Image (tube, coloured by chain):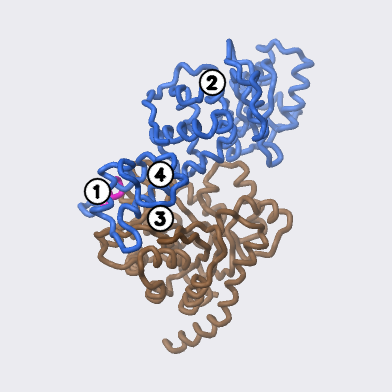
Chain colours: A blue, B brown
Amino acid sequence: MSAESKNLLSLQRNFMSAIREPVFGDSRELTALPPRDGEVTAGFCALAENEIVSTPNLEARERLELYHRQYWFRLLDSIDEDFPALKRLLGKENFWRLIEAYLELVPSRSFTLRHLGSGLADFLRVNPGLAGGYPVHAAELARLEYALCETFEQPKRPAIAPEKIAETRLALQPHLRLFAFHTPVDEIWRLDDEVAIPVELLAPPAGEAKFHVAIFRHAARQIIRRIEAKEFSLLQAIAATGSLAAAFDASDATPEEVSAWFQSWTGFGWLCERERSGKIEIIESASNQKLVNIPLHHNS
Amino acid sequence: MNASRFTNFQSLGIGIGLRVPHYDHILSERPTVDWFEIISENYLVDGGRPLEVLEQIMAQYQVVQHGVGLYPGSAQGLNWDHLRKLKALVRRTKTPWISDHLCWGSVDGTFSHDLLPLPYTREAAAKCAENLRIAQDFLEVPFAVENVSSYAEFKDSTMTEWEFLTEVVELADCGILLDVNNIYVSSVNHGFDPLDYVNHVPHERVAQMHIAGHSRYERFIIDTHDHPVIDPVWKLYARAIELCGPTATLLEWDDKIPPFAEVHGEALKAKRYWKHAVAHHQTEVAHVG
C-alpha cells in the first residue's frame, strides 16, 4: 500500500471511529448543532478541526456531527423496524439503551442493514441487565423477530410431491426456522401495539423449553405457527436423517398424529429434496454463549 | 435518447426506483413504466421474497442496477465477496449498465451504511479509479459512478468536486450517473454554483441522471429523497439535459413514499425538458461537427 493510500486509510479509520462514537439519547430530538461539550471525544474534535473545512454556514465539528447522527439514526431506525415486539416488551427507554449498547459493541459487518440484528439475541443472553427485567423473554423475542428477517430472504426449493417422499433424501425448506422457546414469545409477538402484555405471558420461565414454533414463508407471507413438541422433534429428526421413515421409527408419535402433521407440512411445502443440509435452529440453552459481558453505557 | 458505450448502447427513458410499498400495485396493475432502477444490495440474496418479486418485475420491465455498497473510494480496495454477488445479480437482471456512488463507507470490515465523503486529491482519485476499473472489468458491464450529496469537505482537497469526478471517470474510463439533486444539495452545503458543476463534467460520459427531493434546514440541506423535486433542481436538470442530450433519468423517492401514480407522475415531469433538449443538443453537436 502506497503512502498516499495509507493516508487515505488513516483518514477513513479516524472518520469511522468518530461517527461510531456513542450517540446521546436525546440527540434524536435535537436539531441544534454542534455536539455539546462532553458528548464527543477529543479525537472527534481533532478530526473535525484538522481535516474538515469550516464555512460561514457550518463549522467543521457540526459537519462531522451530521455524519455522526446520520450513522446512528440510520442504524437505529433499521433496528426499530425489525424488532417492534421487543421494543414493546422492553419499553422505549430500555429498548434504545439496549440497541445503542449493542451497536457500540457489535457494529454492522454486513453490506445490508437486514443483518444488523443478527447478534442481538446472543447479546441479550450475555447482557441480561439490558433486558428490562425479562432476560429470557427478550432474548427469545429477539431470536423470533430476527428469524422473520432471515425467512424473508431465504430460498424456497421445490416441494417434494407426497408420492416421492419415501424415495427422496429429505431436507427442510431453507426458509423454515424451528424453535423451542422457554417463553410464549409467539403470543407476545401477535399482540397489537396498543394491548398491554398480559402478566401470564411474562411469567418467569421454568424447566424445559415448551413452546415450539415454526417460522416460514408461504404464499408471499411470513408465518409464525405454534407446533407440538413431538412434531418439532420429528421435524428435527427428518432434518438430521433425511428420511421420514427413520425419523418416524425414532418418534413416539402415533400414525394419526404423523398423518395430520404430514398434511400440513406438504400443504406448506416444508419438505424438499436435500441438496445441502436443511437449516434448523433451536434455542435450548443460553449457557454456552461466548460473547463477553460488557459494562452498561448510559447515554440517554 | 443517448446511447453510448457507457449505456451499453441502450437508450432508456424515464424510470423510477423499485420500492417495496409499490410491489403490489406494480404486480397487479402492470403500469407502463420505461424502466425500474433496483438497489442491487436488496437482491444480493440466495432467494426469498426479494428475488421472487424481482423475477416477476423482470418478466415485464427493464431493470437497471444501482448500488449503495460497493464503496469504490475505499482505501482498502473492493470487497470481492460483494463483487461476486453483484456479478451473479448482473447475470440475472441483464442490466445494461450498473452504477454506484463515488464514496467510501466501510473500513476494516465495519460498515457505516452511509455514503461517506472523500478528499478531492489526486491520490484519492487514483484509488477510486483503480477500484472502478477492477469493478467494471470484473462485472463485464459499463459502470457509471454517481456524485454524492455531502456535508463535509476536507482541507486536503486540491480540486473541486467536479474536477475530482472528471479525473476519476477519465482515469477509470467509466460513465457518470449525474445526480442533479445531489449537486444542488452539495452546492448549498458547501457554497458553490451548481451550474459550474453541471457545465464542467464530461457530458459525453453521462449515462444516467438522478432527480430527487430533499429536506431543507436553516443552514444546510439533507438529501432525504422524501419530497417532490424542487424548481431549482428541475432548472439544473434542464441545463444538464441540454448539455448531455436526453438521458435515462430516474426519480428517487425513498422515504414517506406516496402512491405509485404520484411518484410516476413526478418522474414524468422530466419529459418536459427533453423536447427542447433534443433540439438544443442537435444544434450543439452540429456546431461541434
The reply to whether label 4 and label 3 mark residues of one chain is yes
Residue occupying image coordinates x 32% and y 65%:
B164
| Nearer to me, A65 or B5 | A65
Q: Nearer the viewer, mark 2 or mark 4?
A: 2
Disc 2 versus disc 1: nearer the observer = 1
Residue that mark 1 sits on: A46
Q: Are marks 2 and 3 in contact (CB under 8 Å)?
A: no
Name the residue located 46 percent from the left edge and 53 percent from the top edge.
Answer: B68
For mark 4, does the 10 Å Cα neighbourhood hold few (<14), some (14 to 19), or many (20 or more) residues?
many
Mark 4, residue position: B111
Residue A181 in sight here: yes
- Mark earlier in primary sequence (4, 3): 4
**Numbered disc 4: what chain?**
B
* Label 3: how many Cα within 10 Å (few below 14, some 14–19, many 20+): many
Kindly report which numbered mark, 2 or 3, lies closer to the viewer in this rendering. Answer: 2
Pointer 1 indicates a residue of which chain?
Answer: A
Q: Where does the magenta region start and end?
A: A8-13
> How far is mark 2 from mark 1, CA to CA?
43 Å
The disc placed on residue A136 is 2
Q: Nearer the viewer, residue A67 or B59?
A: A67
Q: Amino acid at mark 3?
A: Ala
Residue shown at 50% from the left, 67% from the top: B209
Q: How many residues crowd around disc 1 within 10 Å: few (fewer than 14), some, or many (20 or more)?
A: some
Task: Verify whether residue A9 appears in magenta.
Answer: yes
Q: Main secondary structure of the magenta part?
A: helix
Q: Nearer the viewer, mark 4 or mark 3?
A: 4
Please state the chain letter of the residue tagged with numbered disc 2 in the rendered image.
A
Gap in angstroms between the C-alphas marked 2 and 4 = 30 Å
Q: Residues within 10 Å of mark 2 (few under 14, many from 20)?
A: many
Residue that label 3 marks:
B135
